[in-house]
Amino acid sequence: MLDSRTIEIVKSTVPLLESANTALTEHFYQRMFRHNPELKDVFNLSHQASGRQPAALFSAVLAYAKNIDNPAVLSAAIERIAHKHTGFAIQPEQYDIVGHHLLETIRELAPDAATPEVIDAWAQAYGALAGIFIGREEQLYQQSEQKDGGWRGHRTFVVKEKRIESEQITSFLLVPEDGGAVADYLPGQYLNLHLSSPELEHKEYRQYSLCQAANGREYRIAVKREPGGVASSFLHDLVQVGDRLQALPPAGDFFMDVSPETPVVLLSGGVGLTPMRAMLDQLLKQEHQAAIHWLHACDNGAQHAFKDDIRQRRQAHANLNTHVWYRTPTAGDRPAEDYHAEGLMDLNQVKDAIALNGAHYYFCGPLPFMAMVKNTLSGWGIAEAQLHYEVFGPHQNL
């Protein structure tokens, strides 16, 4: 428990943090990778280059400083980050490394303000936060290990099937090399892959949404080829049926858990449809009683993954309704069959169908898409508790 003086000192540094902005976390990562280059095998370096990871860390540090006297405000963020950390197999001793470089960064960027009292306060504050993460992550590790078919750490899987789902998205069906069962997961969660190969400069950890309901036997993930993406290019171009991949247990704080009487609306843009497919699979598997709506937007039919599969499910289930927007349909795309509207998704076109009492809304896709969805639904008066979304990569608030 932090004392009042420590809390006061940390909160007094908020203006300093705000002034430094992401220069603080950019310096931190540069420093840490220089002194501990082995951590390049843990962090996604493309997110470093894009600035998304330094921005996400800065937001987290600033939020902690502002709310250090009311940590309950941060509980959702802590849960999300803890799940991500288990996907990187983060260990307690690594928190000591991060803490050291954070304090040294403060000293180096603000030598006048970084008095011994300030550094000591931040050391105590960081230690308290690290303790929370270490405790929660150990709980998650144990939960994964104790499940039927569960495990801790790395486990070898074999690629049983590699299937092209669209021009950009390929799915991989993975079965455990040991022939055992695999742990169940909640629809919306992701599988953690640890990629290591002579073709890769660094080891790469990645999280990919599981795109079918849990069955205890296998995992299916779907991967979008990202322009210049190290891991996605490796999986698309080099990984073949029969190859072995290392995986850590499924995780993630974005998942669907609703009663059979609850209307469900799934909204996706581009590759954001991958967790939605697992949700739909689960709903139909459980013979969901209430209405199910899936709204999807993408460029055209060539970019529309799982198109035929979803059409077949819609035809077989009377309570499933779909609505698709193609931004730039091609001559081969069939109106009313492949898609229903041209252009970007416009929820006002379907408001009467999806503004349902008590419905829960799950959405995933590019950030502008998700911001549009959240703002529109909130504008309709949909309660925050009924809105659920996932950001691929470092989290950003909408």
Image: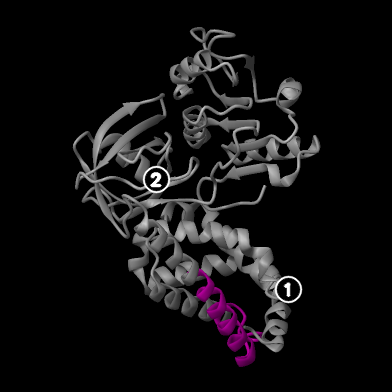
Say which quadrant the N terminus sits in: bottom right
Which quadrant would residue 107 be assigned to in this image? bottom right
Question: Magenta includes 116?
Answer: yes
Look at the numbered disc 1 and give the secondary structure of its residue: helix
Task: Give the residue at x 42% y 39%.
Answer: 210
Numbered range of the magenta stretch: 107-133
Q: Which residue is mark 2?
A: 184
**Colour scheme in use:** one colour
Label 1 crowd (10 A; few <14 / some 14-19 / many >=20): few
Q: Which residue is mark 1?
A: 15
At which x and y percent is residue 126? 56, 78
At which x and y percent is residue 31? 45, 72
Seen in the picture, residue 257 relative to 323 is either above or below; the reply is below
Main SS of the magenta part reads: helix
Q: Residue furthest bottom?
A: 116
Disc on the earlier residue, 2 or 1: 1
Question: Magenta includes 125?
Answer: yes
User: What label sits on residue 355 in the rendered view?
Assistant: none
Task: Give the residue at x 37% y 40%.
Answer: 232
**Residue type, mark 2 in image:** Asp
Q: Nearer the viewer, mark 2 or mark 1?
A: 2
At which x and y percent is residue 383? 76, 43
The reply, left or right, for residue 97 in relation to residue 182 is: right
**Residue type, mark 1 in image:** Pro
Label 2 crowd (10 A; few <14 / some 14-19 / many >=20): many
User: Total of numbered circles in the picture?
Assistant: 2
Alpha carbon of mark 2 to alpha carbon of mark 1: how far? 45 Å
Task: Give the residue at x 29% y 39%.
Answer: 174
Is 279 in front, or is 131?
Answer: 279
